[in-house]
Image: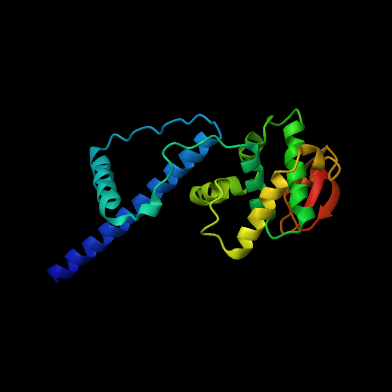
Amino acid sequence: MFVIVILRFLIRGVKHTLWLAHEHRERKIATTILRMIGMNIRKPEKKNSMKTLLKITISLIITLTLLLPQELAVPKKPKQLTDKQCLAANIFFEARGESIKGMKSVAAVTWNRVMHKNYPGSVCAVVFQKKQFSWTHQESPSRILQVLTGDVAGMQKKDRESYKKAVDIAALPRVHFTTLMPKNVLHYHSVKVNPRWARYKVKVMQVSNHIFYRG
């Protein structure tokens, strides 16, 4: 009976350790992404509980030295992201699997926002503006970093093909998109949803799986 209790305690400790390690890694990756897009980061306040801090420290030391594989490492010195990388990521997450026209339409709206006075003046700032594109706060930081840096090794074949198309589209000059979508088209949503804000916008067209609005 005593052995069973000990085993249960050890299993629970290992699970907790792995969970802490995963959360720690995801936070580090999120911090890396924010640094790459040039944002300032406010460090979280430290907890006063020495007991909690001691548990976390011991768990992380054990995990990082014994349990975690090498592939869990994150970049220590991230490079600044380019507009091309941010645009390619936005096209990929928003319109992968759609037609070329559908992917270009997403890119056109992104550029329209960049050029509009009510939005930031760079692609990366527009893409990572708070809660504007759902994938920026719904996808895991590790997945976002994978796409931003072009790490296609772990992607499925369809995703690799979509990513290549997204990169090719993102490399096109901005003037290429001016004829695809009127400059006042700043919003769109998937045909699978019906957001409340769409009631107050003017529908312009549907391209593939997205409906586009002006205003």
Whether residue 22 sits left or right of residue 176 in the image: it is left
Q: Residue 132, can we see it?
A: no
Whole-percent x, y for residue 70 in the image: 36, 53
Outermost residue, left direction? 2
Q: Which residue is at the front of the view, 159 or 141?
A: 159
Quarter holding the N terminus?
bottom left
| Residue 101 vertical position relative to residue 182 in the rendered view, above or below | below
Whether residue 103 sits left or right of residue 44 in the image: it is right
Whole-percent x, y for residue 143 in the image: 52, 52
Q: Residue 33, can we see it?
A: yes
Quarter holding the C terminus?
top right
Outermost residue, bottom direction? 1
Query: How many dots with numbers?
Result: 0
Q: Which residue is at the front of the view, 33 or 59?
A: 33
* Res 52 quadrant in image: top left
| Residue 215 vertical position relative to residue 17 in the rendered view, above or below | above
Whole-percent x, y for residue 26 in the image: 44, 47
Say which residue appears at 26% left-offset and 57% top-offset.
Answer: 13
Say which residue appears at 46% left-offset and 38% top-offset.
Answer: 31
Say which residue appears at 76% left-offset and 55% top-offset.
Answer: 100
- Image coloring type: rainbow
Q: Which residue is at the front of the view, 41 or 51?
A: 41
